[in-house]
């Protein structure tokens, strides 16, 4: 049996746990504790890992990991990111400065983003003052083009679309021979 | 500037033809789609005019096999392919030039007359389809809406510079959709066009077959998609 993983990262409260729960075949394994950080509008927040999985019809296993959101765990992001098929960054548009949030994850994953497919899902996109297109422009200023999609993590179809786009990117990586750990 | 009139075609086909004419850099400078007034060529569907003014060329848009009584060269088969339309219009331009230079005003030139059929379409017109497109940013939501095919095309173009034909082949998205996607980007000045030398090299052949399909039939990506029900 082979194991593959997809990583969910992003702002605490943006919906990593919810997104993994939406597609996992097992109830997500969650390690949330009461939130003591007043900056995030939720009672519980992920400090450890979220975990979900999908059994593939090849008998292989796809593991879904949610990283701790807080920037102080960025060493863990990179460890978890090793050999991941791809990364989904979830952001919360209702936060005061979601582009500053994006920067935290872009910087945190750093070099890994050069070889790892990545998709950005923007939650609560109808709230806040940042337009969805601002994310693409922000990335363009840094010479990056990453897919940016609105997402409501409570809707399975939205989460599936994020993964589908990630797979489309991966398809291209594989073709260009950039993805040595696949097949 | 040659004038092209569309008659008896669906809105979708009209939009497609306008896009092809606008997107093909060389057609763009020599052809104009007009709604009324005089024209040089009429592209007509089943309900288009049976007769046209003398000196005006008529190209029929028809289902495959529907055109047995017509000259093959005067027919554009459905589904409309950009390459075929461009070739027909190039041949028409050549026929019109010849016809007007050498014959009486009442004679109608024919695209399929032997002398013209042998005239190759200008190279540049074929070349324009092989120009490669690239994007510098993720397309705005107004272009993508929630169109999965457009999103897929954006993913591919974000990673490679490709001609319309290659984009269609590699993404598995129909040519018509690729053209309307590029057209929507072009309208907002979001496409860069380059020469063939800017294209990414073709993928290794053992993977080529599977990537021509929307999904990997087998292999990892296919199994993940199946597990997700997509
Ligand atoms: N009303 C609303 N709630 C949302 C939306 N997106 C996410 N949520 C909620 O926000 C919470 C996200 O929590 P969680 O998944 O634990 O976030 P995590 O910290 O990233 O793991 C969940 O209760 C979601 O139902 C949205 O667009 N609208
Ligand atoms: Mg969580």
Image: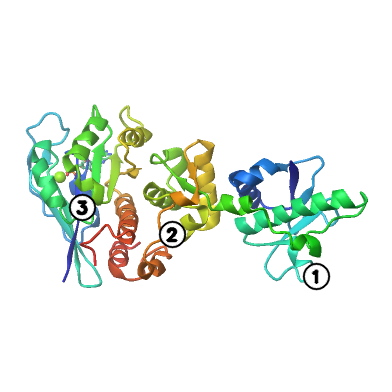
Nearest the eye: A56 or B16: B16
- Asked if marks 1 and 3 fall on the same chain, the answer is no
Q: Quadrant of residue B117?
A: bottom right
Residue name at image x 24 percent, y 28 percent: A97
Q: Does the beta carbon of the residue at mark 3 sit less than 8 Å from ligand 1?
A: no
Give the x, y percent position of residue A62.
Answer: 20, 62
Give the x, y percent position of residue B1.
Answer: 74, 41
User: Which label is found at residue A20?
Assistant: 3
Give the x, y percent position of residue A131.
Answer: 36, 31
Q: Quadrant of ligand 1?
A: top left
User: Which label is found at residue B69?
Assistant: 1
Residue indicated by mark 2: B170
Position of B159 with respect to A182 (left or right) is right
Using a 10 Å C-alpha cutoff, classify the residue at mark 3 as few (fewer than 14 neighbours), some (14 to 19) or many (20 or more): many
User: Which label is found at residue B77?
Assistant: none
Position of B47 with respect to A4 (left or right) is right
Position of B167 with respect to A115 (left or right) is right
Q: CA distance from mark 1 to mark 3?
A: 61 Å
Regarding residue B221, the answer to whether it shows in the image is yes
Q: Is residue B193 above or below residue A181?
A: above
Q: Secondary structure at mark 1?
A: loop
Using a 10 Å C-alpha cutoff, classify the residue at mark 2 as few (fewer than 14 neighbours), some (14 to 19) or many (20 or more): many
Q: Tell me the chain of label 3.
A: A
In front: mark 2 or mark 1?
Answer: 2
Q: Secondary structure at mark 3?
A: helix
Q: CA distance from mark 2 to mark 1?
A: 37 Å
């Amino acid at each position: 049996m082979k194991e593959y993983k997809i990583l969910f990262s992003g702002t605490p409260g943006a919906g990593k746990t919810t997104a993994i729960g939406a597609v996992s075949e097992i109830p997500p394994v969650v390690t949330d504790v009461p939130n003591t950080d007043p900056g995030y509008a939720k009672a519980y927040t992920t400090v450890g890992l979220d975990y979900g999985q999908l059994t593939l019809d090849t008998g292989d296993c796809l593991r879904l990991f949610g990283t701790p959101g807080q920037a102080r765990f960025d060493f863990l992001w990179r460890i978890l990111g090793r050999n991941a098929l791809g990364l989904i960054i979830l952001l919360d548009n209702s936060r005061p400065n979601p582009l500053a949030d994006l920067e935290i994850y872009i910087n945190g994953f750093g070099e890994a983003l050069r070889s790892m497919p990545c998709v950005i899902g923007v939650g609560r996109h109808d709230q806040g003052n940042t337009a969805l297109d601002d994310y693409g422009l922000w990335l363009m200023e840094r010479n990056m083009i990453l897919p940016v999609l609105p997402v409501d993590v409570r809707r399975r179809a939205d989460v599936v679309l994020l993964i589908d786009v990630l797979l489309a990117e991966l398809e291209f990586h594989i073709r260009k021979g950039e993805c040595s750990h696949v097949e | 500037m040659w004038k092209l009139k569309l008659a008896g075609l669906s809105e979708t086909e009209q939009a497609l033809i306008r896009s092809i004419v606008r997107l093909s850099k060389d057609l763009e400078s020599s052809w104009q789609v007009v709604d009324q007034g005089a024209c040089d060529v009429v592209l007509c569907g089943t309900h288009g005019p049976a007769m046209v003014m003398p000196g005006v060329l008529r190209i029929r848009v028809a289902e495959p096999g529907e055109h047995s009584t017509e000259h093959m060269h005067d027919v554009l088969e459905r589904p409309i392919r950009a390459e075929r339309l461009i070739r027909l219009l190039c041949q028409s331009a050549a026929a019109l030039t010849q016809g007007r230079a050498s014959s009486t005003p009442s004679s109608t030139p024919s695209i399929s007359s032997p002398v013209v059929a042998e005239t190759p379409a200008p190279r540049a017109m074929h070349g324009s389809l092989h120009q490669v497109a690239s994007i510098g940013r993720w397309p705005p939501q107004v272009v993508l809406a929630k169109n999965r095919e457009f999103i897929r095309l954006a993913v591919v173009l974000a990673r490679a510079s490709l001609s319309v034909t290659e984009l269609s082949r590699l993404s598995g998205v129909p040519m018509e959709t690729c053209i309307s996607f590029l057209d929507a980007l072009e309208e907002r000045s979001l496409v860069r066009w380059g020469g063939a030398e800017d294209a990414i090299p073709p993928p290794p052949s053992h993977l080529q077959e599977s990537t021509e399909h929307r999904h990997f039939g087998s292999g990892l990506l296919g199994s993940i998609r199946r597990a997700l029900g997509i």
